[in-house]
């Protein structure tokens, strides 16, 4: 069985595209081969900045010959029907076989598809793959029609076995496939031939090309950490940067350079971000001081001076970059120490969203909500409000304008420089968290208050203007905001009534609009508007924008006022916004995903969501975990079956009798020991469950409930519910009602599946 080797050699492929491109090459080629009947044993893909490579082992020498038998029309069918069948089968009339069947003589075609040599199939598949390759961006060059991410120079495509290597015959837009490739662009540019994959990788390495990106990444990290360790330093880990840099070089040469003393006092995050974004440098930290003192760069070649010239050039460019960063830092510090008021004033001119006002208006809303949340999370109200008002001030800073990813972090530095309390400074950085499932959750009370206020404001605002996530789109990252809010609540074990907070947040969203309505200049218009209804929320906002526009002439202003007056009624929050319940459902859906990842079934969560107080997520999750633990026990699982049996019998009896059996079960009407035992067990369970529920001790409540399994099972074994005596029957049905009420006081067990 031959092995297949493919290499597509081109100009430099962007690092971000290499991994996916190698995977696409493997999938397209192997899928095409299998579809054509050419199977294989294994396949592996590789990439460097200038090549995509694919090796496939154990390829069949030929695709197998297949025979298909196809049933046709009757032998005496119209000639046109027979001709159509012949065209579809690709046969002539004399090649058909006539057979007797219960329906008379029928024509059959025996279609033999002869196998193809592997080289022919590979050529067809590879040509199609190259011509239809799914690059995110591609280009044409010269006079040809072929598109590739960068100009494609050569195609290596060989099938090799014990007898030697065979070049697959293929030509695309003048590029003829062969058995030759080239090494490193500068260190070994000459072309050479190969015969197998092992020969290919060995010769590439001698030509200063490391084919495997994982091997390049390992070499970079090994050399970088050893070099830093030798100087008593450590490399700041950055897996994303490592993957990117390994896609920029074919022969990695690690060099460590110095950062000029003038820049060592810059915040380490500024140094790290500037070097990463502009130069693709790794930061090297002094573990004793936490300062970034050196950098690691990865060259793509060896030099006679061991990289000295490369380092000198990099250090010069880096100094220019860091000079800009230092300028931004010093300017920002001057503003921060003066109180940051100019930055806050600038945010009045920065639109957060056309329908949700400016960043300054958003800060007002978050500050009001953070103040409300403060006592609920154990924070000082004045601190929480102050932190919320300053948390986004750094959006106006020069440093964050240059490096948006530093927002919040720079705010912490600037607020501390302004002399504010440490908790307020920390909130600037932490209120954005958590951003992802692995991100740390803030625990400092002030940070928690501001972070929650920020996320609630985002959710309620976009819900109010009907910008909700769809199945495939979430442009405002509302799912992330919801999950962040959930984690803030649960990790900090907060007991919050979310519906009340949603309502207050929505009120805050429209408070700035109310202020305009209260302007005396508009009172006459308001009176007229009360008589006219707005046609839609979108129209309300559109005309509201016209209202707020500063017109240059009185004529334009009057026209705008008349248009606004004709279409907009007096502002009424409740008229436009009644989304609290829908937003809570959205949070519950996110919570289901979060808890499902922790092993709690969706039906258990639904059973707890159905209970009163489901806007208290901490309470809800405590209930769900207790129910989940109970159902993992034999008693808990069997109790569910007993409950369902009781509920089904009760439901059917109430439907048949047209009455509700919800009161009056009395032990004096019990006729069996099992009945009397169940009455006693229910009395005992109620005495435990009711106080446990009041104390939110769901584990105790569930344990007491599971203890009913034995008495309920015994009751159903010994007692016939539909007794002949009407009084006894009614008493037993009321007893079933007591069982179901006690069970559903802990969770809605009707929603438990199975």
Image (cartoon, rainbow, N blue to C red):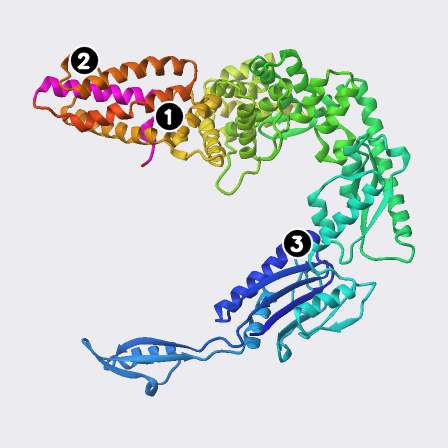
Sequence-wise, the earlier of marks 2 and 3 is 3
Pick the residue in front: 335 or 320. Answer: 320
Up-down: is 251 above or below 695?
below
- Percent from the top left, x then y, of residue 468? 50, 34
Sequence-wise, the earlier of marks 1 and 2 is 1
Mark 1 packing: few (<14 Cα in 10 Å), some, or many (20+)? some
- Taking 53 as reference, is 685 left or right? left
Mark 2 packing: few (<14 Cα in 10 Å), some, or many (20+)? some
The secondary structure type at the circle numbered 2 is: loop
Q: Determine the main secondary structure of the stretch shown in magenta.
A: helix
- Mark 3 sits on what residue? 17
- Quarter where residue 414 is shown: top right
| Quadrant of the image containing the N terminus | bottom right
Q: Nearer the viewer, mark 2 or mark 3?
A: 2
The secondary structure type at the circle numbered 3 is: helix
Separation (CA) of disc 1 from disc 3:
47 Å
- Mark 1 sits on what residue? 610
- Percent from the top left, x then y, of residue 608? 39, 26
- Mark 2 sits on what residue? 666
Q: Nearer the viewer, mark 1 or mark 2?
A: 2
Q: Which residues are the magenta region?
A: 725-753
- Percent from the top left, x then y, of residue 747? 36, 24
Pick the residue in front: 746 or 511. Answer: 746
- Quarter where residue 686 is shown: top left
Would residue 650 be visible to someone looking at this image? no
- Taking 413 as reference, is 505 left or right? left
């Amino acid at each position: 069985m031959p092995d297949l080797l493919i290499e597509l050699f081109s100009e430099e492929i962007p690092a971000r595209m290499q991994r996916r491109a190698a995977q696409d090459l493997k999938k397209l080629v192997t899928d095409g081969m299998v579809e054509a009947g050419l199977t294989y044993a294994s396949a592996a893909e590789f990439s460097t900045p200038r090549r995509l490579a694919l090796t496939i082992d154990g390829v069949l020498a030929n695709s197998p010959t297949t025979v298909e038998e196809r049933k046709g029309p009757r032998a005496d069918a119209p000639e046109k029907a027979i001709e159509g069948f012949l065209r579809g089968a690709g046969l002539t009339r004399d090649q058909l076989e006539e057979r007797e069947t219960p329906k008379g003589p029928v024509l059959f075609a025996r279609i033999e598809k002869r196998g193809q040599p592997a080289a022919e199939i590979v050529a067809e598949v590879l040509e199609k793959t190259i011509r239809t390759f799914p690059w995110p961006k591609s280009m044409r060059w010269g006079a040809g029609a072929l598109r590739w991410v960068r100009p494609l120079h050569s195609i290596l495509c060989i099938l090799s076995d014990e007898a030697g290597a065979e070049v697959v015959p293929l030509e695309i837009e003048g590029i003829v496939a062969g058995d030759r490739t080239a090494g490193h662009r500068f260190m070994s540019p000459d072309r050479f031939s190969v015969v197998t994959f092992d020969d290919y990788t060995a010769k590439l390495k001698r030509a200063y090309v490391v084919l495997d990106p994982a091997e390049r990444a390992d070499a970079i990290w090994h050399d970088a950490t050893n070099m830093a360790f030798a100087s008593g330093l450590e490399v700041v880990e950055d897996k994303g940067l490592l993957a990117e840099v390994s896609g920029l070089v074919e022969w990695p040469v690690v060099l460590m350079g110095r950062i000029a003393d003038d820049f060592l006092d810059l915040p380490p995050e500024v140094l790290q971000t500037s070097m990463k974004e502009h130069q693709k440098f790794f930061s090297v930290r002094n573990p004793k001081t936490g300062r970034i003192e050196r950098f690691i760069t990865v060259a793509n070649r060896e030099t006679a001076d061991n990289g000295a010239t490369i380092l000198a050039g990099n250090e010069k460019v880096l100094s220019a970059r860091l000079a800009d960063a230092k300028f931004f830092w010093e300017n920002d510090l001057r503003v921060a120490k003066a109180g940051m008021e100019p930055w806050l004033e600038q945010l009045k001119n920065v639109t957060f969203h056309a329908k949700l006002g400016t960043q300054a208006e958003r800060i007002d809303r978050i500050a009001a909500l953070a103040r409300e949340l403060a006592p609920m999370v154990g924070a000082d109200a004045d601190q929480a409000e102050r932190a919320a008002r300053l948390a986004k001030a750094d959006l106006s800073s020069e440093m964050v304008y240059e490096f948006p990813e530093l927002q919040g972090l720079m705010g912490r530095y600037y607020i501390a420089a302004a002399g504010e309390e440490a908790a307020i400074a920390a909130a600037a950085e932490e209120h954005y968290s958590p951003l992802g499932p692995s991100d740390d959750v803030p625990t400092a009370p002030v940070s928690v208050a501001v972070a929650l206020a920020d996320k609630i404001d985002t959710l309620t605002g976009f819900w109010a203007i009907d910008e909700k996530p769809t199945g495939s789109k979430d442009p405002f990252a509302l799912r992330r905001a919801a999950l962040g809010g959930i984690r803030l609540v649960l990790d900090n074990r907060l007991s919050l009534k979310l519906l009340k907070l949603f309502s207050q947040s929505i009120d805050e969203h429209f408070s700035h609009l109310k202020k305009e309505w209260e302007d005396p200049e508009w009172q006459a218009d308001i009176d007229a508007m009360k008589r006219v209804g707005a046609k839609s929320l979108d129209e309300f906002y559109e005309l509201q924008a016209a209202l707020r526009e500063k017109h240059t002439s009185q004529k334009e202003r009057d026209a705008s006022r008349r248009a606004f007056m004709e279409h907009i009624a007096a502002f009424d929050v409740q008229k436009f916004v009644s989304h609290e319940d829908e937003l809570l459902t959205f949070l519950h859906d996110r919570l289901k995903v979060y808890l499902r990842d922790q092993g709690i079934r969706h039906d258990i969560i639904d059973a707890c969501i159905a209970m009163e107080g489901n806007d208290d997520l901490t309470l809800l999750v405590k209930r769900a975990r207790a129910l989940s633990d109970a159902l993992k026990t034999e008693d808990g699982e069997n109790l569910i079956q007993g409950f369902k049996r009781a509920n089904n019998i009760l439901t059917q009896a109430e439907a048949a009798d047209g009455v509700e059996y919800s009161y009056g079960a009395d032990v004096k009407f019990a006729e069996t020991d099992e009945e009397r035992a169940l009455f006693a067990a229910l009395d005992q369970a109620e005495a435990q469950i009711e106080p446990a529920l009041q104390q939110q001790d769901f584990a105790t409540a569930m344990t007491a409930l599971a203890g009913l399994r034995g008495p309920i099972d015994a009751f159903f074994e010994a007692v016939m519910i539909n007794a002949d005596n009407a009084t006894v029957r009614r008493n037993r049905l009321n007893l079933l009602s007591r069982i179901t009420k006690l069970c559903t006081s802990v969770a809605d067990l009707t929603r438990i599946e199975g």
